[in-house]
Amino acid sequence: MRAADRTVRLVEIAPGEVRESGLLKDRILLRSVGESQSADNTMLELAVNDLKAADKAWRTHHEITGDRLVEPLLVVQVEPKVTEPRLVEILSVIESAWPDLTDYAVAHAFGDPHGPLRVGDRSIRYLPPEAISGDDRARVVLFKSALTTGWDCPRAEVLVSFQGKESYTEIAQLIGRLVRTPLAKRVDAGDDRLNEVAAYLPGFRTEHVMRVVNALTEDETVQVEIVVSPVVCGRSPNVPAAVFELLDTLPSYTRQKATFSTRTAQLMRLAAGLTEHGVEARGSTKAKQWIVDQMRAADGQHRDELDAKVKDILSLTVGTTMVAYGEAIMQSVGKSDARTNERDLDGYFRRAQRVLPDGSANWYFNALCDDGDDDVDAAARLSAMASLGFKDVIEEQAAELISAWRERHQSEVSRRPRHIRDQIEPLWYLGGSPMLPTTVEIRDAYPAATERVRGDATEGITTYPKHLYVIPDGKPNAGGFPVDTSGSSWESEVLQSELSSESLVAWYRNPSSGRHALAVPYMFGDKHQLMHPDFLFWHNDGGIFTMDIVDPHRPDLSDTSAKWAALARYAREHSDRVRRCIAVIKISGALRALDLTTSGIEDRISNATNQNLMEALFMSDGMAYQ
């Protein structure tokens, strides 16, 4: 770049934004043995079972969505000086856990030998680290320590490391190479497992896992949720099904993933989706015919103007000016008309194809030719339409058909499976915001950490009752849900207060991202963002389940007023869903709450742009929270 004398402009992208975009997996699951006994082979068997589950989930996702099939990979980091009997043992455990794996599905990436490795009566093929990602036939790769530098493999979703506890930095670096999503997007339909990477660390005790966590959190390029000693919480049998239904239909928002250069392109994508799922027969044909009919109608309304432009395009007026040699006198001697060369006409038509949206120029050209126009006249008419700004007319009519199809089919589509709704509903959104309206999607299971790192050790996370998802029977703290409130004592006080209500039926710890979270759009500066309130509570209010939103938040953060103003607007727009919506802060050691459903509160919060103004608003308009 310097040699080319070009200016280099560095653009810094926050890792959190990369994760939000779906390019990084949502969670890292760290599994270790809490006991002193050796369990290497048991953990390896669990890892293979995890790989099988991921394989099944990816195949189901492929069949439902049509996305590229991902063949998940298990990477096994063997001991530095692994012996042949130990390798035989590892291969035997893998084979017994997944008998369908062929010999070719297992490979090694040892630095020595760079070729087949003889293990007992088996030959394990060699696979260079840089070739692992592209070799879908490899499902298990054995290695020592040669995969951490300059290597990543998005389909590597399960790791087992038999390295010693002193290798925690290297293991953290290795995990950091596994966090890229294989489809370069978050999987918004299907199993949550598809957005996770699991690391099995059989040689690590709790205090050693803490070192891995610290090493991961020090890597600023990762910034992925790290779940220590995860437990899979299932749906609570004590929560009525109606409450889960209320969460599943709760209005929310998501970032627009598909963008379209024109409304016409959006219309054609919508038409294809409606036809694919049997909602609108021959949708693409109808959409094209609609555009042609609207272009023909606009042609008739502006016929005189178009005819004049076509005449101008088909002929070229050439003026002649005479200049006498050696004199500074010029004299116009006349003008003459010449027919425009066909090569120039072809250039005009190619420009019309670029200017008029999607394939509309070609569609109307064919229609004109079918009506009896010759190619030259038809091309000239399209060139005239492009020059006179007919693109806006076509775009308006494309948006009109999108709206009509939405009005006609919205009810039917809303009853279809989630993956069909997720495909179609964004396609008929015509708003200017990049945030699309959607609904929260309930999950079958909620993975949650049961331990957290504190200093040089780990400690258990407090569990709370009445959550929608609970630790299953037979496990410690069954029936509760773990919530790490170490980052804010306010959250613990809020939970204790809200859970004391006799009318409480259930509550939900709202995730900080993803399709399972209530997300509310807000503007901060010139950027569109999403905020996620902390807690949702459902109460039995006279036989009707009503929802409260409670969001404890620091008042000194620069985006606090923008977030709470947006939350107040959400509560107002969805008053049929939200009974109570409060923001909570701590002033002079005491919690105070502000009712975000109060009339006019949105404007007052928007103006409280710093901590002093926000605290003053809570003191004047708020109340003691208890």
Image (spheres, grey):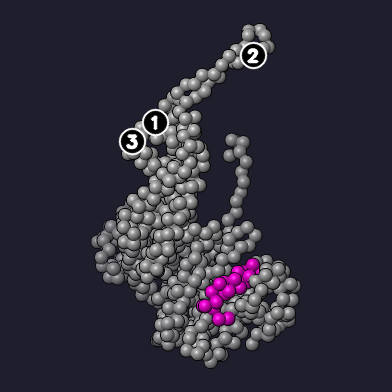
Residue at numbered disc 3 = 372
Classify 133 as above or below 450.
above
Residue 376's label in the rendered image is 1
Circle 2 sits in a helix, a strand or a loop, which is it? strand
Residue at numbered disc 2 = 330
- Which residue type carries mark 2? Met
At x 60%, y 69%, the residue is 566
| C-alpha gap between disc 1 and disc 3 | 12 Å
- Which residue type carries mark 3? Gly
Residue 534 percent across, percent down from the top left: 56, 76
At x 65%, y 71%, the residue is 602
Q: Main secondary structure of the magenta part?
A: helix
On whether residue 576 falls in the magenta region, the answer is: yes
At x 49%, y 65%, the residue is 437
Is 96 situated left or right of 429 in this image?
Answer: left
Work out which quarter of the rendered image holds the N terminus and state it.
top right
Q: Nearer the viewer, residue 585 or 351?
A: 351
Residue 399 percent across, percent down from the top left: 46, 54
Residue neighbourhood size for the residue with mark 2, other residues' Cα within 10 Å, grouped as few (<14), some (14–19), many (≥20):
few
Circle 1 sits in a helix, a strand or a loop, which is it? helix
Residue extent of the magenta highlight:
560-580
- Which residue type carries mark 1? Val
On whether residue 261 falls in the magenta region, the answer is: no
| C-alpha gap between disc 3 and disc 2 | 47 Å
| C-alpha gap between disc 2 and disc 1 | 37 Å
Q: Is residue 137 visible?
A: yes
